[in-house]
Image (cartoon, rainbow, N blue to C red):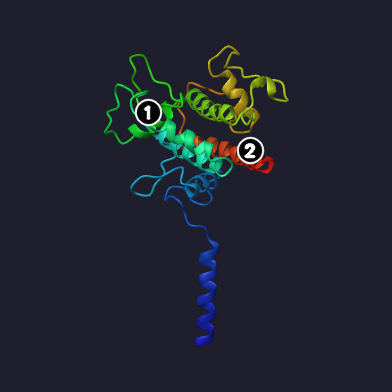
Amino acid sequence: MKKISLVMLLTLILLLISIPANAFEDVPHDHWDHYDYIDKLQSEGFIRGYPDNTFQGDQELTRYEMIMVMARIRHRLFYELNSINPLFWEVEVALGHCPDRNSFTDVDKDHWAFMNLDFLGNGDILFGYPGGTFNGNRSVTRNELAVVFDTMFDELRYILADGVWPDPEEMDSTPVRIPDLPDDHWAYDSYQRLIWLGALEGYPDGTVKGDYAMTRFEMAIVIARIWDRMVYEIETLTLQQ
């Protein structure tokens, strides 16, 4: 009996080890594509849930939530690039110590998001509204997310001077036709790069619905794909050193 109990115990342990931890209570393992994306971002430390251990993926992403995720990714990118050249870490430190350069009039210095807002603002990544406000509780549109992430990695392209993030003319394909976004729209080039890199997809009819609010689930998919691409570029750059 003891031998049987021991075998059963070992089997149970192996089963528990083989089953991945459920990242959030409202994102089960069979939650179509979202579980893998969210699990990856959580394991990297890029996203966090709410105090009740939920992700609330159908909720609209706020501008404050967006910058928290962006800041974590940007810190991580500089950390990874530091292994290639310590100069990259010095650039990040310099960007993080200009406390008054890009502060927003509606975000006090004791606000929980202030430091990350300042860090991203000093890289000219964030944009505010007339009057110098940030409106952090507003929902992020698909247009805004596309431009902000494209701008963040465009900054890295110039820092690296290695063409990590492509200019539209550098892409080896014709522009994707976007029915609801004219080619003179302020988000057009960003969409072209993100679509070309496989980080962002439109709807079945080819539209991007750029003025729609981005949900937390949609954010997770876009960021996970962008991060995969950036890891690939960093690894490629490392091999070239």
Q: Are the residues tagged 1 and 2 within 8 Å (C-beta)?
A: no
- Residue at point 48% right, 21% down? 211
Residue 60: x and y in percent read 41, 32
The vertical placement of 44 against 127, above or below, is: below
> Label 1 to label 2, Cα distance in Å?
29 Å
The residue under label 2 is: 233
The residue under label 1 is: 98
SS of the residue at dot 2? Answer: helix
Mark before the other along the chain sequence, 1 or 2: 1
Bin the neighbour count of mark 2 within 10 Å (Cα to Cα): few under 14, some 14-19, many 20 and up.
Answer: some
Residue 137: x and y in percent read 34, 28
Q: Is residue 205 visible?
A: no
Residue 239: x and y in percent read 68, 43
Q: Residue furthest bottom?
A: 1
The vertical placement of 36 against 70, above or below, is: below
- Residue at point 61% right, 13% down? 183
Q: Quadrant of the C terminus?
A: top right
> Mark 1 against mark 2, which lies toward the viewer?
1
Nearer to me, 30 or 218: 218
Bin the neighbour count of mark 1 within 10 Å (Cα to Cα): few under 14, some 14-19, many 20 and up.
Answer: some
Q: How many marks?
A: 2
Indicate which disc residue 17 carries: none
Nearer to me, 181 or 190: 190
- Residue at point 39% right, 45% down? 49
- Residue at point 53% right, 75% down? 10
Nearer to me, 100 or 51: 100
SS of the residue at dot 1? Answer: loop
Q: Is residue 50 visible?
A: yes
Which residue type does callout 1 highlight? Cys
Q: Quadrant of residue 72?
A: top left
Which residue type does callout 2 highlight? Glu
Residue 102: x and y in percent read 37, 23
